[in-house]
Structure formats: C-alpha cells, structure tokens
Image (cartoon, rainbow, N blue to C red):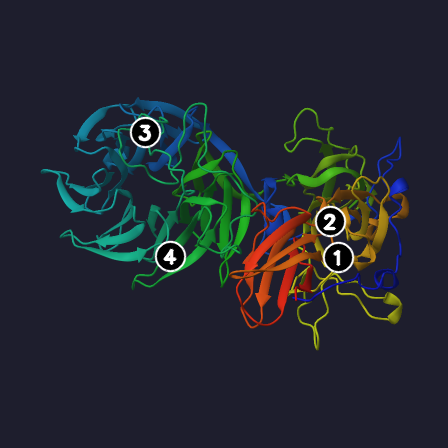
Amino acid sequence: MPHSTSRLPGRTRARFRLVRPLCLGTALLVLSGALLHAATPVFWRVSTQDELLRGEVEALAVDATGRLTLGRQTEELFDTSAPVAWSLAPGGDEAVWVGTGSDARLYLVEGDDGREVYDAEGLDIYGLAPAPGGDVYVATSPDGAIERVSAGGAVTPVFDPDVTYIWALAVDAGGTLFAATGEPARVYRIPTSGQPTVLFESDATHILSLAVAPDGALLVGTQSPGQVLRIGGDGDAFVLVDTAYDEVRSVRVNPDGSVLAVALSGSRGASPSPSSSGGASTSSTTTTATVSVTTTVSGVSTASAGGGSASSSSGGGGGSRRGAVYQIAPDGLWERLWRSTTDAPYDAIRTADGRLIVGTGPDGKIYEVLGEPPRAVLLGQAPAQQVTRWLVGGAGSLRYATANPGKVLSLDEALAPRGVYRSEVRDAATVSRWGTIRWHGDTPGGSRIEVSTRSGNTALPNDTWSDWSTPYAEADGSQIASPNGRYLQWRAALIAGDAAPTLTSVSVAYLPRNLRPEVTSVTVHSPGTVFQQPFASGDPPLAGLEIDRTAGEVPDTTATLGRQTYRRGIRTFVWEATDGNGDDLEYEVAYRAEGDETWALLMSGLARKVFAWDTSSVPDGAYQLRIAVSDAPGNAPEAALVGTRESSVFDIDNTAPAIAISEVTETSDGLRLVFTVEDSHSPIRNVEVSQGRDQWRRVYPVDGIPDGLAEAFSVDLGAGDGPVIIRATDALRNTSTASGR
C-alpha cells in the first residue's frame, strides 16, 4: 500500500482542457411557441416484399420482387351468417356443399345463391364428402355422428362412433367411406354394406385430415405429433413426414400422385379448443393453432410484421412457429415448399394448371408459390380473417371457405380493375413534422396510381385521425398535407386502364420533434478504482482519464471498460444515457462541494460515458458530480437539448491519518503503547502494529470500534526486541506509519 504524508502536486488542471461547454443556463430553456425538431430527417421507405406484406391489400398482389400489382378478383358467392365455414365438398354442376361451425348447419351453394339444407345436431361440421346421387356425407362434432343428406334435405344416419370429434371424411373409388376422428384418434372404414370397422388407431391425440391415394391407400395427418402417415388396406401405417409442427391440418393428393400436407403450430401457451363453441367441448386435450370461434370473438393468433414466404427470412424454431406446406413425392421423398412464421396456413391446393395456392390466417392472406426454388407471391387478401378450405370445381374454378366471417367465395383468373393498399402505421416515436412523399411505379395504357396519407396520435387509426388526403399529384415528391402527429399511414389505389399499373416503392420523409436526452444512471466507483482501456498497445491508458488534446492524440470513444486496477487519488465515474431520437451525444462533467450551489466544470465535449478524475487537486471533503448530456452533435444549435443527472455524494480524502504517540511504558509483561490516530475527513478503519520481526497484528481502539475521525489506542506489546511500527489506514485507503521506539 503506498504511503502518503502530503498531498500530491496539483496537476489535474493542466491536464484538463475545458472545451465546448454545454451552456446549461441557456440550453435548458424551452423556446416558447414552437416545437424543437431534430436537424436530420428520417426516411421511411417501403420497397420489399416483406415490407409490403406488413400492410393490408384489397384486390392487389405482391410478387416476390416486392412489386405491388392488381390481384385476382374475389367474388362472394354466399354468406353463411355463421362465424366459420369449416368444410366444402362438390355438389355437382358447380354446386358446393358447405358445413359451418357454432351452429352445425349444412348449405348448398349453386352459383351465387345458397340455401340451408340441414340443421344438424352438434356444433360443427368439420367433415364433408360427396355421396352417390349428388348427396353428401356429413360429419358432426362433438360427440360425432355421420349422416347422409340429400339436396332436398332428406337425412339418413350412417354411423355413430363412440368418439368426440370427426375431423375428416373421404370416399375411395369403390364407394367405401373413411372417417378420421379425435379422442380417440382413429380411422374408421365404413363400407357401402356391412359393419364399420376400425382400420387404424393412432397414439396421437387426433387424426385431423384424410385423403385417398390413387392405389387405394389412405393418407392421414395427425395432431400431437404433427405427422403424415400412409395406411395400407390391412391397417399397417408408415410415417411419411414427421413435421416440426403440432398438427397436419390438411392432406391432398395431386393429379401426379404426389401429396400436399399443410402443417401448423399455435403460439406456445395459447391452445384454443377444437370446438367452435368457445368452451362447450368435452375434450380433455386441446389442439394448438385451431381456429376458435364464437359469435362475438374470433381469431387464432395475433398478426406480427412480415408475411409468408417460400422460405421464411426469420427462420424456424422460436416464436409462434406458424406453419409450412410440404410436398411428398410418390417415392416418399419430400420437400418444404412454403413456410411462414407470421401466417398460419389452413389449407393448400393445386389448381387445374398445377399452381400451388395457400390459404392462411389471421389476416386472410392468399399466397401462390412459384418457381424453382419456390418463391411466394401474395395473390390477395380474403374479406375474412382465415381461409379455411379450398375446392377446385369441375371447370377448374377455385372456391374457398373462410372464418370470421364464415363465407364462400371464388378466386377468379381475371385481374381486378382496381385495388387498394394500406401501409402499416408508422410510429415516429414523437410528434413529427411530415415532409415529402415519393413513389416509383409504372402506369402504362392510361392506368393510374393514387397515393394519399392520413395521420393521428393513436397507435390504431380511429375517428380522431385526420381524413385521407386528396391524392398527391407528383410522384417525384409531394408535400404531405396530413397534420403533424406521431403516427402516419399511406394508401395507394392502383387503377387499371388498357393495362395494369405497378407500384415498386414509396418513401416518406419526416422530422421528429427533438427529444431531450437523459442520463439514466451515474456509478461512482470506489477510490482508486480505474480501468485500463482495452486493446491498447504498450502500457494501457486509463479509461476516462482525459489527456491534453492539444498534443494531437485522438481520444477513445468506446464505452467498454477494460481490466480493473488501482491508482491512488483517482475516482472513476461511469454513466448511462439515452436519446429518443437516436442522436449522437456528448457529455459535460462538473463538480461541487457538498452544500455549495455553484458547479465547477471539469471537462466538456466528452464522447464516451466514463470519466476518471485525478482528485489530488481539490481539498478533502464531500462532493457531487453532475453529468450533462447534449444532443448538439446531431442537431442545429437552436434545437439542441440537454439532460442532467447528479451523482450520489462521495468523499475525497487524499490525506493520510496522523499518528501521535503519547506514551511508551514498560510493564512486567513488556511494553504498553498509548497513541491516537486522527484523520481530517475519513473514519479510521484499520490500525496495525509490528514489533521487530513480528507479523502485523490488528489492534482496536479503547472504545472497541474503529469508526471515528479520531481514535485512542492502548496496546500491550510483548517483551520483544526491535522497533515498534504503527500503521494506520482510513476509509479511503490512505495509509501512514509511525515508529514507537
């Protein structure tokens, strides 16, 4: 331990070059009547597929390169008035059977006209399959039963198994009916004559999907675990794909004999019931990521930014793990054609010309997967939250069912004459001044692109937001007419002429209100604690110990602290600071003695958040440090703001304790040493004595507690030879010694 008998020479002021003070007296003033805005504008640009998929589309498509174009027309064929349409089956002559949830009703839709045919027992119709003569097999749940229903409404019981759910039906070329069930997970074989039998029973929780392969084998998708199995005529099963997801919602056989399988998982911790009743299920086990619907509450999951892609950019594994579409070749080899961590797929289908179409939730997005490697294109967005089921008609027309609300719609080949895109809401973090909006696109053949904006101060647009502006005239740059605010949204209408327009990017500039930076914490390290700057060559300099900048040395601006060591007389201070605008910051350090009102500047213009103070130039006493942070490097002088924080009170004591020996007397056992130790500022913490070659031993004051500025000692020593040495250390590690003889 170094000894000190006098204060070190005053060198600190020579080292500190006081530059660029923050002028707290004026910088803390707020200019009345005007908001201070940041000097640098922010540019919000939307130009990629992922960015565009964060918005809402109406009759528009987003291709893999990030172009916004007119989408295929969607026509509403029938509104079931139910919250969910679960199932579809062909009804002949382009008619479609529809089964709904929460009311278990069966509809027949012919053209754009639909009628109720049967009000079934139960809550949901999950499974439909065509029956001879234009009839349909209907599976109801819970406490499932299978019935045959004619177009005229005649109902014939077929099979009433002892199961909770009947999820899917399929009919083979010979007319045999198969049923997939849950709780227990079985496949029943129901011949046209004779008794139904259990063909296969799984250790999964549910068998959710079912299809018949060209060779008569069954393909099934299970839940918990999410697997695709092939089941032979004797009931033997072979796993084709063990997916990384919780359930396989749909399996379909393509014309070439390959199989499409749709797998999905729900958000961990959210397991809605398979029943659309919202709680009426008798199930003891729940299915993850299944659409859960009541007449007033809907949805499976919460949408997040981004969209489906053939290969999700955010990777797999964590988060909600929404779902994927697999294709299994006739030889058993499989590949994943599409995956998304933001959209949950419910069904996928190959069109008559071989295109892959995927229906998703929770935003009703419809994707087409193209190319090699596969790339996803957003074809459009259904007027519902989920696309639950696809059906290809006899003439190649594409029909689909939806949930929230439960409708039947068609997806046509013709492009819509007009489409609308609404961007995601931009949060500028604070009230901002809107600048210029620009866009790039192509408008051939008299087509048009009309871009408008609106703004507000709530995260979700509502009646308090401004109206949509009139369309801006100049694509190369138009001043945004919407009122200043925190949130902004833009809308683009694409209108066809003799050809279709294309929008490739939109850019918005804005100037946020300047936010005052803040020092969030100040740490005062113990006396003598210093940190060597990392990655330094030679003798590492101390982090935060400022040099004379006139010498041409460049200060380190990193906030990383290196190895901790000790340097007498140095106090190290480390702080944290934030700025809501993300501006570059600089710092000023000042100090004052406890009780004083005036702050003395130590250093200004600091770029890093550490300062080492050589305290040998100030008197012993109690002090405070003030850290001031300014965003001046990133703002005009009149717009710069300053924030401050004061440290806790700390002590500076560079003077060693004084030792005064008042008496050394001989006793029968040796020597008695009487002395006092006194310090001007810090309490006495440790006093030791040594005689001759003896080891140091700690001694205690007469009152038994070393805690005062002055302590009296009476110490009995043995009859040893050699000098008696007293060593005293105060609370701030200043040490002095004295000889007793």
Q: Residue at x 66, y 62 (%)?
A: 561
Residue 560, quarter of the rendered image: bottom right
Amino acid at dot 1:
Thr
Where disc 2 sits, the SS reads: loop
- At which x and y percent is residue 465? 71, 28
Where disc 1 sits, the SS reads: loop
Q: Residue at x 56, y 73 (%)?
A: 693
Q: Is residue 106 left or right of residue 671?
A: left
Amino acid at dot 2:
His
> Counting residues from the N terminus, which is met first, the one under dot 4 or under dot 1?
4
Q: CA distance from mark 4 to mark 1?
A: 81 Å
The residue singled out by tag 3 in the image is: 124
- At which x and y percent is residue 357? 46, 48
Residue extending furthest bottom? 538
The residue singled out by tag 2 in the image is: 681
Looking at the rendered structure, which numbered label has been put on residue 327? Answer: 4
Looking at the rendered structure, which numbered label has been put on residue 655? Answer: 1
Q: Quadrant of the N terminus?
A: bottom right
